[in-house]
Image (spheres, grey):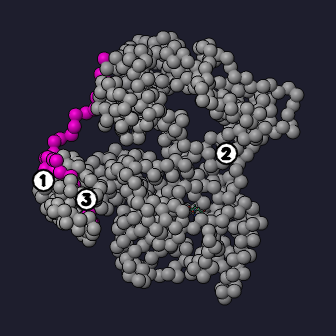
């Protein structure tokens, strides 16, 4: 393709992709399927790869991430990011309103108008747009300064990379061209659950907020992109009309391309505020994301400056926090579940009770230390709670109502599934069934993990089917799945020829999922999906992985001595060996795909540093292009540096390079080298 044509095509793709992005996230009425969307994006990425000079910082291709950030630089906020003071009762909210009204009155204002909004339970961030382009995004940090996480934020589809602002005069009175937007990054409940599913048990997040905070601090932005984060904006600064009220600012944010909270209410009186709080106390459980309260703020933004703030929180806003939802019920029994790694988990069987929008009849008791801590017995009345956590937990025993007929909860001596004597390794809180190979629960767990969505995603291979396969001796590990015949499958309970056929088809499809997915599917302890991807780069074949020493493994990013040991242990197990042989024989990908099309080697042997601002490239991508062409990226100029790419306003690094006599090139020359 000619460059001219490529330019036209990439511009067309960009605007087409942004349009579909808006249709999907803002208007929630998509016109094309996810698959078609991905194809558009892939075409754009391919074009930008072929013509790197066409890549712009606001290209939607930037959202897929890929750059690795070693450390997040610190940025000082233009204005401190305060937090809100919390209240827990309507009486306290009334106090707040009285205080505000006194202050407003003293300022000569009339009766103020309040906006009641939902309080999103996520992570507050601030973003700076210069001339409409997103240039910097940061976490709240300590309120004064936070971490710069722009690369990660760019992967969030509801964060515009360029503001939709044909109305340039809107820019700040000082004509700085800078706009600041603040809001909350959050994860939807369903995405949070999916994320936890793909993680080893010991690495699971307690709630969506923790998962969001953890995700925003990831160094690999492509992993952030995979986790489907959302952003809701609630603050806008830098527009010309400084008197614009809060609610109008929300509309303004929307016209710029942001999503704002749909549920809010303008109120003048306490009764309206109390009604809003009341209305959402239960209704909030029907939302796809978590909210933990209501934020009340003044609609007149000019009052914000006039009322000011205390050291920690503004005087013009307050948060009302809903009490954690609790319910009383009876612990009817305890069952012991055996996980795929042999861990015994006591699970409370509760008398069904309504809590926070759903009926709860089970809840994990985690381990026996927890049972001891609670002092709980079967037959006890217990309080269960859902607070920020999706899964309810038993928080206390109602001792005052204990009956005489309660029973102690004993650690079972033997595995409830296979009868093997349980063990508790030194220093661990959990008991384990050591019968790794033979325990049917562990076999089932391993096969289900192998088939799970983020592993090989084998549709139709559900719990009841797997239970039958294991019980009848048709499959003891994932390798056996690929030897199943149509007759064997069709002979199982609740299986007709058609569904048996579907299972075989799904198994066939699973062979094409790729080597990194297979690594995760093997179910090596501590190896989650992200670690598996990391491993697949370091060890491009199972053979290579098997040969790697403890030291080799520990040198891989994100892999510490515990994971390294666990990988070594896995390969030492005879049953794992047998399973791998079966999988290889069935044609599963035992190595990574061959490297993609060869690029030139124009940076071979070069130690390259970028300094100053590039006009036509995103820094991380430019660095990646150097690496792909054989070069190394260094972080400071030294005698060993061989090439400096200097962009606009390059400073001390450029000077040092000149002093040391290192070759310096500009962006044009860099493009020629590419
Ligand atoms: S306004 C001065 N509005 O709650 C702070 N905050 O403790 C003004 N939050 O840090 C913030 N939903 O992370 C505002 N609708 C909303 C919010 C909201 C959640 C968070 C935000 C803030 C914390 C306050």
Mark 3, residue position? 637
| Of the image marks 3 and 1, the number of the one nearer the N terminus | 1
Label 3's element?
A: loop
Mark 2, residue position? 386
Q: Which mark is residue 1?
A: 1
- Residue at mark 1: C-beta within 8 A of ligand 1: no
Hey, which residue is sitting farthest bottom in the picture?
Answer: 108
- Residue 313 is one of the magenta-drawn residues: no
Which quadrant holds residue 396? Answer: top right
| Of the image marks 3 and 2, the number of the one nearer the N terminus | 2
Mark 2 neighbour density, 10 Å: few (under 14) some (14–19) many (20 or more): some
Label 2's element?
A: strand
Could you tell me how far apart the alpha carbons at marks 3 and 2 are, in whole angstroms?
Answer: 53 Å
- Magenta residues (range): 585-613
Which quadrant holds residue 415? Answer: top right
Could you tell me how far apart the alpha carbons at marks 3 and 1 are, in whole angstroms?
Answer: 38 Å
Residue 291: image location, x then y, percent:
60, 55
Could you tell me which residue is drawn at 53 percent across and 34 percent down?
A: 201
In the rendered structure, the answer to whether residue 493 lies left or right of residue 588 reads right
Mark 3 neighbour density, 10 Å: few (under 14) some (14–19) many (20 or more): many
Quarter that holds the C terminus: bottom left
- Magenta region, main secondary structure: loop
Could you tell me which residue is drawn at 78 percent across and 29 percent down?
A: 377
């Amino acid at each position: 393709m000619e460059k001219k044509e490529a330019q036209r095509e990439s511009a067309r793709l960009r605007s087409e992709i942004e349009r579909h992005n808006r249709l999907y996230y803002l208007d929630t009425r998509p016109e094309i399927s996810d698959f078609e969307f991905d194809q558009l994006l892939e075409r754009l990425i391919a074009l930008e790869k072929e013509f790197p000079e066409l890549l712009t910082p606001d290209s939607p291709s930037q959202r897929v991430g890929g750059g690795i950030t070693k450390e997040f630089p610190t940025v000082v906020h233009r204005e401190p990011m305060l937090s809100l003071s919390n209240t827990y009762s309507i009486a306290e909210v009334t106090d707040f309103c009285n205080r505000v009204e006194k202050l407003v009155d003293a300022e000569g204002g009339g009766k103020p108008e309040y906006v009641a909004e939902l309080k999103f339970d996520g992570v507050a961030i601030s973003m700076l747009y210069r001339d409409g382009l997103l240039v910097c995004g940061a976490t709240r940090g300590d309120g004064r300064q936070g971490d710069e996480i722009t690369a990660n934020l760019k992967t969030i589809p509801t964060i515009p990379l360029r503001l939709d602002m044909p109305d340039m005069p809107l820019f700040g009175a000082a004509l700085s061209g800078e706009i600041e937007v603040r809001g909350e990054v959050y994860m939807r409940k369903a995405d949070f659950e999916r994320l936890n599913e793909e993680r080893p048990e010991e690495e699971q997040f307690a709630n969506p907020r923790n998962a969001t905070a953890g995700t925003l601090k990831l160094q690999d932005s492509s992993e952030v992109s995979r986790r489907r984060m959302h952003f809701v904006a609630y603050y806008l600064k830098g527009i010309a009309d400084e008197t614009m009220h809060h609610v109008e600012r929300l509309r303004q944010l929307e016209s710029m391309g942001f999503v704002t909270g749909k549920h809010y209410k303008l109120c003048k009186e306490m009764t309206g505020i109390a009604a809003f709080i009341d209305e959402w106390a239960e209704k909030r459980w029907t939302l796809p994301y978590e909210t933990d309260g209501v934020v009340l703020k003044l609609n007149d933004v000019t009052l914000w400056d006039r009322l000011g703030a205390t050291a920690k929180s503004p005087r013009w806003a307050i948060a009302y926090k809903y009490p954690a939802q609790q319910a009383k019920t009876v612990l009817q029994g305890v069952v012991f579940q055996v996980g795929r790694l042999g861990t015994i988990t006591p699970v409370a069987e509760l008398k069904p009770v309504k809590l926070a929008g759903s009926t709860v009849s089970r809840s994990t008791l985690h381990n026996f230390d927890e049972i001891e801590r609670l002092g709980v017995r079967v037959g006890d009345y217990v309080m269960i709670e859902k607070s920020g956590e999706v899964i309810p937990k038993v928080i206390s025993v109602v001792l005052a109502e204990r009956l005489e007929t309660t029973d102690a909860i004993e650690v079972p001596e033997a595995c409830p599934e296979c009868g093997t004597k349980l063990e508790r390794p030194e220093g661990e809180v959990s008991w384990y069934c050591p019968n790794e190979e033979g325990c049917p629960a562990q076999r089932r767990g391993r096969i289900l993990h192998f088939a799970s969505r983020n592993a090989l995603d084998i549709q139709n291979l559900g719990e009841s089917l797997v239970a039958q396969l294991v019980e009848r001796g048709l499959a003891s590990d994932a390798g056996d799945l690929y030897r199943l015949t149509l007759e064997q499958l069709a002979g199982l309970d609740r299986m007709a020829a058609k569904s048996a056929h579907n299972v075989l088809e799904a198994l066939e499809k699973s062979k094409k999922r790729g080597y990194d997915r297979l690594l995760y599917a093997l179910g090596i302890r501590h190896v989650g999906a992200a670690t598996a991807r990391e491993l697949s780069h370091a060890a491009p074949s199972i053979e290579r992985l098997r040969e790697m020493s403890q030291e080799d493994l520990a040198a891989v990013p994100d892999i510490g001595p515990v994971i390294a040991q666990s990988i070594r242990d896995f390969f030492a197990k005879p049953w794992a060996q047998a399973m791998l042989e079966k999988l290889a024989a069935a044609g599963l990908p035992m190595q990574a795909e061959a490297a993609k099309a060869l690029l030139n080697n124009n940076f071979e042997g070069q130690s390259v540093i970028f300094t100053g601002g590039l006009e036509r490239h995103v820094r991380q991508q430019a660095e990646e292009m150097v690496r792909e062409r054989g070069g190394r990226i260094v972080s400071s100029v030294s005698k060993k540096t061989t090439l400096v790419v200097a962009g606009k306003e390059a400073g001390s690094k450029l000077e040092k390079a000149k002093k040391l006599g290192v070759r310096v090139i500009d962006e044009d020359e860099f493009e020629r080298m590419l």
